Amino acid sequence: MMSSQASTDPRWGPSREPRDVESPEYERHLSTEEHSPPETGWRQRLENLWVTRQMAEGTDNKTFEIQLSLKELIIYVIFLIVFNIVALGMMSITYYYYTKVLMGLFVESSFKVSLSCVVTGWKDIKTMADFWNYVESPLIDGLFWDVWYNDQAITSKEDRNILYENRMLGIPRMRQVKVRNNSCTVHDEFRRTFSTCYDYFSSASEDTEPFGLGTGTAWTYSSPEKLDTSSYWGWLGTYGGGGFYEDFSIHSKETLEKIKALKENLWITRGTRAVFIDFTLYNANINLFCIIKLTVEFPPTGGATPSWDFLTLRLLSYQSKYDYFIFACEILFIFFIVFFTLEEVREIIHFKFRYIRSFWNVLDIIIITLSYACILFNIFQFVKLSDVLQGLLNQKTTFANFDHLGRLQVDYNNMEAVALFFAWVKIFKFISFNKTMSQLSNTLSRCAWDIAGFSIMFFIVFCAFAQLSYLLFGSQLERFSTFINAMFTLLRILLADFDYDAIERANRILGPLFFVTYIFFVFFVLLNMFLAIINDTYSEVKSEISSRKDFEVSDFLWRGVTNALHKFGYGHKLARSDGPRQDGKITFREIRDTLRKCNFSELEIEMFFAKYDIDPDQVVGEVETRKMLADIEGRKFDTESSIHPKSSPEVTQQEFTMLEGRVERMEESISTTIDKIETILAQLEKMAKGQYRDRP
């Protein structure tokens, strides 16, 4: 996605197509572009005005391509640093500690349900009676702090805060959703026994009729539009935003009286499917809000299933100097995204429909789209939040609904997290500084189809075991209670996170058999096949990369460093083994690279070094080199000619390698020609024998 702005550059010349273009016109263009006169049209001026690395790929000028790569890398690293500051700057461990403290107060506070039974907290509620006992005791004690720890009454209003530090915004609200009678069908055999039937919650079965006392918001239905509440996804179902609600008071005694009135008049009935307790706290010391929702679901099976949500947010930003630093980074982030957008438009104009063929281009579109969504959310929060928040804070004696603000902030955080994740993934596009760093991306791209084919086979076997475990243990074990839970449980087994005793207790015969079979086929067979595919591909990639001599970014950087050191007079101290030597000597690394190019194995190379006693830390002189070559070619070594070689023009290592390649190609061509000649001679000989036989 990075680019560099360049004026008309003779190194770049006319616009070029990407590497995958193989048309004759393109080949002819590359071969004659250095000699063709430059175009002067507006399209050509646009092509030369903004050149990206992807547009420069496939050109003969590798130096210019690497310069673009370095510029793009530097720009992208700066962007990534800014993005990390924006995304992580507002997060801290304070969020966790604040949530933990409030969870300890409202979820883990123990209370008595009888003289001999003590429930350890909200999370252990099992019945309707447990729910009412919690609301009457721990909830009231947690919401209203009227005395100090020494039982002395609190006189200052500012000290009447939860845990002495957290101010409640507005008043709490308790809401329930119900289903109507006969929302399900009783079997014919039991219709005389059961005259009522209450199904799971759904919009079709929701009860909206008044009940109980018949007056007041607690006994009459209120629509989601009136309550301005969104739906809630619980453990047992999804519940609408409407229902029957009761707002608490700002005083503990009045709140307790309301709760007792609801309990005595049976506010919770057999049709009740979920009860929600909502309230919001604010801590001025750390400038954090906590939107709390305590939920208890009452399924048709009976009993109760409690859950809770503690959403800690920073809704008020830009208060301190650090916040304004984050704001400056956000402005810089917007400029980066606009810059990248223009760059992608430039590449779309250049590549047209071929633009979407590149994985990195698709990743760029995802990052830019998510970034724009985050920017819009942030602007909306900055412009609208102060007005909305001021209206909510003014409702001191009514319920302050922070539900929508909280959900918007959660959506913003999620999109920002995903965008940052993809931004880090894109680093792989710029890791080709050396051969080792590019091995991972090359390995994954090469074995992608093999892994895709293997994944189908793995998915079939895995789903078969998941269905088997769901049917065998679903009615007894929570981890296998649904098909999705069964799949995740099987994944956890592969990570050595399992409860074998529970599986054996669920089925003493099929449990152990299932466990052993699953471990054998999935862990010992399929996973090892998966690793074998990657390992085999990695070996091929590593072998190819080690035998290939490409001009990489690292070579470009090293050449720049070498030139700089030579200018300052320190070039003689470099012990760089790459490139030709002017003294006729050769290094250990050059010998190894040359033998690898000739398809020698590592064992043969080590045997070669051992035979000639070559020290890795020393260079081999010209005489020793000529002697080794003579020994390899099987001819007698001429000492005199080695000591006093004939003068010859200097040949660089690159020229020698190029000539060596040409000689090898000529040998292959000659060998092919000889084979063809032998074939023709054999055919002529057969024809001659046939004519000889036909003679009378």
Image (tube, rainbow, N blue to C red):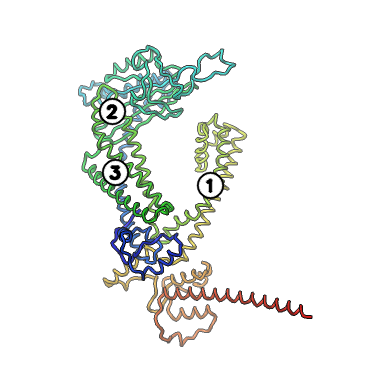
Whether tag 3 and tag 2 are in contact, CB under 8 A, the answer is no
Quadrant of res 27:
bottom left
In this view, the mark in front (3 or 1)? 1
For label 3, the crowd category at 10 Å Cα-Cα, with few meaning under 14, some 14 to 19 and many 20 or more, is: some
| Mark with earlier residue (3, 1) | 3
The vertical placement of 99 against 652, above or below, is above
x%, y% of residue 385?
26, 34
Residue type at tag 3 = Gly
In this view, the mark in front (1 or 2)? 1
Secondary structure type for disc 3: loop
| Mark with earlier residue (1, 2) | 2
The vertical placement of 302 against 373, above or below, is above
- CA gap between label 3 and label 1 equals 39 Å
Query: Can I make out residue 165 in this image?
Result: yes
- CA gap between label 3 and label 2 equals 27 Å
Q: Which mark is residue 89?
A: 3
